[in-house]
Image: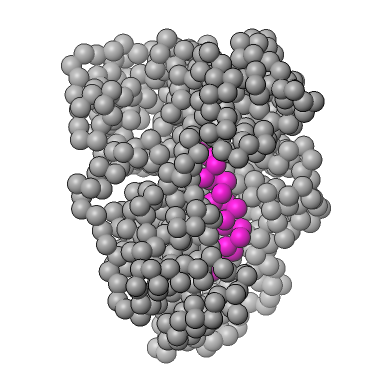
Amino acid sequence: MSLVLPRSDRHADHVFDVVRGGFRDEGNDVVARSWSRCLNEYRLHPDRPLKVPVVDAHSLEARLAKMADVVDCARYEMTTLYQQLADGETAVVLTDTDGVILHMVTSSEFAAEVEPMGLRAGAVWSENAAGTNGMGTCLASASPVAVRREDHFFTQFTGLTCSAVPVYDPSGEMCAVLDVSSRSSLMQQHLLVLLGMTARMIENRLLDQRFRSAHPVHFHSRPEFVYTLHEGKLAVSDDGRVLAANRSALFQLGLTSVAEIRSRRVEDLFQSSLEDMVQRSSSSSFYPIVTYRANAAHRFFAVARRPAEDARGGGGITVMPVPQTSNRAAQKTTATRGHSVVSTFADPQLATNLSIGQRVIARQTPVLLCGETGSGKEVFARAVHDGSPHANGAFVAINCASLPESLIEAELFGYRAGAFTGAQRAGRRGKILQADGGTLFLDEIGDMPLDLQARLLRVLEERQVTPLGAEETHDVDFQLISASHRNLLALVEEGRFREDLYYRLAGVELALPPLRERADRRELIRNLLNAEGGTDASLSPEAERLLMDHPWPGNVRQLRHVLRSAAALADGHPIGPAHLPTLQTAAQRAAPLLAAEPPAAAPVAAEVAEDLPKLNPIQANERQVLLQLLEQQRWNVSNVAKALDVSRNTLYRKLHKLHIQISHPE
């Protein structure tokens, strides 16, 4: 029997029928068992009005303090996933193991809509509090779940679709749940793959952060997967004992839990000592070395390093040297927090800009990068750093747009112990201090609040920094690279950005071309595919054509995530159009429009096309599709909303966003 029910007015009856019938539906047994728990254990009723409980501010603050490192590691990855999904009616949510929402990334409009139903920070979405839902049922089942609309236990939540995966800490215990909740009919299996990969990235970041004083060991049975999401990663003490491991490491070593590996020596796992692996890795410029499984012939490729805190005498962030995969100057591989980012600078404009950037920064001239979101500004900045006199120092990046205003100051300048409620007991070194002797990269600098702009300007002028709550100052020496997708001069004219800071940042201003304009697009696609899917990954001609023809509004970041998920979905087979569902859908929407005759006359859209605000290619296609649907339904908004399976309010917002005016009454 199917758990999907088209009519919400019979939802409660269906829940009772499924539970009484013994829920023998093998396709969605997780949901049916959850319904049974809701009825029999929690004594809930599907139609009973529910107000999701919310913890008080003090309790939420305490939970955030307890989970500070997890939230910190998740924040960037959640923002990246949200940008990749590119759906304004979607929220990326992180909860603790009690189902309490700690952090959420969504649009302000969608946040305002879903807050009354309890989708907000502090809300408790455990299964016994909110019935069957992505977050709570993931916690209850300790496994990835997809809870489609009518899969929810409570009728009032059947307008949402939720997918959730567990997040594990370095000890192997579940520490959080990562969820995507949406009103859209997203492809759930595809979404679960993306969520799973995002959870792995968060887990790898968390392992790095909690074991900064340990030796990191990266390994895989194939050398191209070292420094990627698929690598095994160990944290090893000075005496060679394993302290922690990620899930990929356990899988490759044939183990099922961290308890099986913790405290075992490196020699018990590989036919090498820790010191030998560190020495050989250093001699090979940290290109993966060959090692063998202890007492077996199974071969691994590994890299072992000194602890991150040792590289600067304690506390500082260090950048891993880059394994050289090619002697061609046009290609660059940059290691970043446990995974590799491959780029190519064969595009003439990029190659020229890179040469300029490396020359001027060697003379302590700040560099300002301009370009669309996702165009590779951080990768470019790392390449400038790697070719600079400070290449042996740390490359420290901070995204000014991804942090709340209340956290930017603490992130930049650091703070002493007890400087404010929720501060770490030992205090925290700020990003500027961490960049001492290296490069500080300030991404989306245009989003920095005005009061912090003044403090940053003073640091740049005096080359000294004072942590929050402290009186002593620290001398700093770093190279500065900034970036923004916004027009900073326009912000200066509007009074939203300091003019003196702008001229201090823009020693030289370099414009990075968007992906759709790059001459090396095909080579970049192939390089990224090798990095994300391995050397065996391949593209069918149809898939390559889709990738080349797509306008890439999300630029290189979008391309990287599309290839990563496509490689995962293809699972070793050649990637075809079916593994690129988003691109295929966009192409299918555009195809009939390109061949269609222009409409004779529309009762809407009195504006001339040239006078419309500029839309990106995806928005332009979406606008044309909506105009066609409106024509087919004789401009009846209710019928169009039903055809799209969205509410009238949602459709009106979309029409407004795409500058379609409804002038005829229904």
Does residue 377 appear in the picture of this structure? no
* Residue 237 locus on image (x, y percent): 51, 18
Which quarter shows the N terminus? bottom right
Magenta stretch, main secondary structure class: helix
**Magenta span has 594?**
no
Q: Residue at x 46, y 25 (%)?
A: 211
Q: Which residue is nearer to you in this view: 568 or 152?
A: 152
The correct choice, above or below, for 618 with respect to 59 in the image is below
* Residue 570 locus on image (x, y percent): 73, 52
Q: Which residue is nearer to you in this view: 578 or 143?
A: 143
Tally of numbered tags: 0
The correct choice, above or below, for 593 with respect to 229 in the image is below
Q: Residue at x 65, y 11 (%)?
A: 276
In the visual, does 488 lie left or right of 166? left
**Magenta span has 195?**
yes
* Residue 262 locus on image (x, y percent): 53, 28
Q: Which residue is nearer to you in this view: 24 or 390?
A: 24
Q: Which residues are magenta?
A: 182-203
Does residue 521 appear in the picture of this structure? yes
The correct choice, above or below, for 187 with respect to 281 in the image is below
